[in-house]
Amino acid sequence: SFPSPIVLGIGQMAATIMILYVSKLNKIIHFPDFDKKIPVKLFPLPILYVGNHISGLSSTSKLSLPMFTVLRKFTIPLTLLLETIVLGKQYSLNIIVSVFAIILGAFIAAGSDLAFNLEGYIFVFLNDIFTAANGVYTKQKMDPKELGKYGVLFYNACFMIVPTFIISVSTGDLQQATEFNQWKNVLFIIQFLLSCFLGFLLMYSTVLCSYYNSALTTAVVGAIKNVSIAYIGMLVGGDYIFSMLNFVGLNICIAGGLRYSFLTLSNQLNPKQPADAENIPLDLKS
C-alpha cells in the first residue's frame, strides 16, 4: 500500500550511489572520476534510466503480477528491433516467429484482462520502450576503456537523483510518502530498505548480464524469470482474476518466451559464424 513509486526509486538510486562510492573508496571496484566529458559519453542513458525506473515501479503498483509479467514481454521484440537499428545485429526467422508467439500470447491475455487498468497499461508499455532502449544503449556505452559497467551505473544514478526528486515534489509523490502512516513500523522500514538494496542488486545484475552477453540475452533471461513470477503471482499475489482466455494467453506467451530463449541460447552456444581471430585464446592459436 506504499503510495510513492518515485520515492522508492530515489531510495534505490541513493543505495546505488552509496554502495558503489564506498566500494570505490575501498578499492573493491574501479570507475573513472568525474570530468566534463562524462555527461556527453553517457547521454541519453540517464533519461532512459530514470524513465525505465519510474515507469517500471508505477506499472507494478497498478497491475496484477501475472498481467505485468505478460505485458513486459513486449520488451523482447522492442529490444530485437533496437539492436537491429542501433547495433546492426540480425536474427533468424525462427527467433522472429518465437517473438510473434510471445506477442500473440500477450495480446490474448491482455484482451481478456478482467482487472483492466488503462493507466497501468500505459505505464507498462512505456516501461517496455524504456527498458529496451536502456538495455541496448547500456551495452553500447559499457566500454571498459571508458566508463565501464560500474561507471555507467554510478553516474546514471548521480545525474538523475536530483531531477527525480524534483519530479517527486512537483507531482505530490513525496508528500504522499511523508504522509504514509507506516514509517513508525519497524517491519515496513526494513522492507523499504531491502527494496532499496534489492533495486540496486537488480540494476547491477542486469548491467552485468548485458556486459557479458547482449541486451537481447538479458531480455531473454528476464522472460525465463517471469515464468516463475507469473505462476507464483496466481497463487500468492492475491490480485490475479482467473479467466480461461487469460490463462491460455499467459501460457502461449510463456511457451513462446521459452522457445525464444532456447533458440537464442542455442545459437550462442553453437555459433554458425567462424570465430573472430581476436577472441581466440592464445593457447588455441598456437
Image: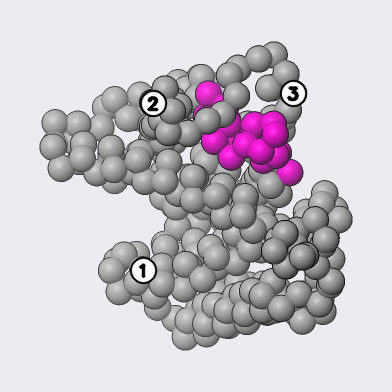
Nearer the camera: disc 3 or disc 1: 3
Q: Can residue 77 be seen at all in this image of the molecule? A: no
Mark 1–mark 2 CB contact (< 8 Å): no
Q: Position of residue 184 (x, y in %)?
A: 14, 31
Quarter of image, res 285: bottom right
The image's mark for residue 26 is 2
The residue where tag 1 is placed is 233
Label annotation for residue 283: none
Q: Does residue 53 sit above or below 158 in this rendering? A: below
The residue located at (35%, 24%) in the rendering is 175
Q: Quadrant of residue 197?
A: top left
The span shown in magenta is: 140-158
Camera-side residue: 28 or 51?
28
- Which residue shows up at 68% across the image and 22% down it? 38
In the image as oriented, which residue stretches furthest toward the front?
A: 286
264 relative position to 205: left or right: right
Residue 128 in magenta?
no
- Secondary structure beneath disc 3? helix
Camera-side mark, 3 or 2:
2
